[in-house]
Amino acid sequence: MKSLANQLITWHAKSGRHHLPWQKSKDPYAVWVSEIMLQQTQVATVIDYYQRFMKKFPTIKALANADEEEVMRLWSGLGYYRRARFLHEGAQMIMHDMQGIFPSDFEMMMKIPGIGRSTAGAIAAFSFNQRKAILDGNVKRIFARYFLITEWTGLPNIEKKLWAYAESLLPKKAIAIYTQALMDLGATVCNKKPLCPLCPLKKTCVAFLKNKVHAVPLPRPKKNIPTQSIYMVIIKNYEEVLLEKRPHQGIWGGLWSLPQYENKTINTGNWVKKKFGFDAVMIKKNLHITTTFTHFKLNITYSILETKSQRSTQPYTWIPLEDLEGAALPAVIRKILLKLK
Ligand code: SF4
């Protein structure tokens, strides 16, 4: 019987994806951008963002020289903004420390912000034809089923085992096609609702043979995560809203957000007067929304106020409501603000 890699390579010729925009190029910069965009986002969503991003920043140099605001703006709506900041910082690092050339050395690649072992593996395979493994969420799911792994794949010892499988399965030739085939199988066949009858691996997949496909992979074990509360204000002025540029450290680093205060017992109107030096009239008080991060839940209480003033000081600025669509905002703040329109 053919090896797993060869079965996938054969399957890919007929059933894989061959026309994704980033497949046109072996340029490691293009592969890097696509891999970072694809980390938490579906292909269908990424395509437009990728094309706009590469048109605006066609080279590492263009991205390195770009204004951070512009990079964030082009990322707006794609979420997980840390990825955009890492790309920007990474381009600057390559210009300053690597003579402007994307490194072909695997260890060097992993020095670039945001590039972990799996992303480096994909770039090494696609751009430099190196026999390196990938282990993203899709591949973990395939291996968890194929080898019937009945523990959560995020556990360190299980991850180690999965990397060992990933390394041992690498073909001697056609590494780029094999890597793409693995990604395509995870996205189109062995996905959340697996289409096993169409799968090239069904004759040897342990979960399929034992009728356990839907039992694996196991979900992340639930744990109680702490809740934090913050208090925010929407201050409107005619058709503008006052936003704050968040510091780089902490949640929503580098994004635009609402002015925030710590103490729930505070009189909001007085706080606005003291903080910004103008009067504002309360329109709606104590609205609530909750958002969940990996390690905590965030309860946001916010009020809407209106002012006639146009005063602002750094890091606050007035942004027209009609520009909010394209602004780099956290998803939950976008949701709150778009309701205003
Ligand atoms: S047979 Fe089914 S579960 Fe096994 S690898 Fe293929 S699609 Fe996934």
Image: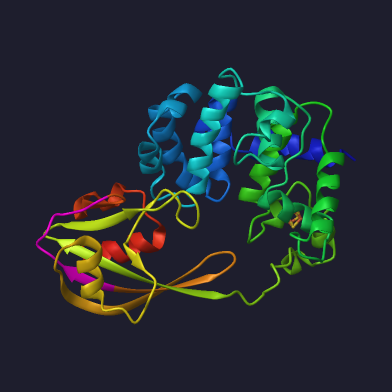
Seen from the viewer's position, the closer of residues 335 and 100 is 100
* Residue at 40%, 37% in the rendered image: 68
* Residue at 32%, 61% in the rendered image: 258
Q: In this view, which residue lies farthest toward the right?
A: 1
Classify 182 as above or below 267.
above
* Residue at 51%, 29% in the rendered image: 92
Q: Report whether 170 appears left or right of 199.
A: right
Q: What is the magenta range? A: 303-313
Residue 16 visible in the picture: yes
Q: Is residue 59 magenta?
A: no
- How far from the left and from the top, in percent, is residue 73? 36, 42
- How far from the left and from the top, in percent, is residue 203? 83, 52
Q: In this view, which residue lies farthest toward the bottom?
A: 265
- How far from the left and from the top, in percent, is residue 131? 79, 30
Tell me how the rendering is colored.
rainbow
Q: Quadrant of the C terminus?
A: bottom left
- How far from the left and from the top, in percent, is residue 270? 22, 74
Q: Report whether 243 appears left or right of 225.
A: left
Quadrant hosting residue 175:
top right
Residue 203 visible in the picture: no
Q: Main secondary structure of the magenta part?
A: loop
Question: Which quarter holds ligand 1?
Answer: bottom right
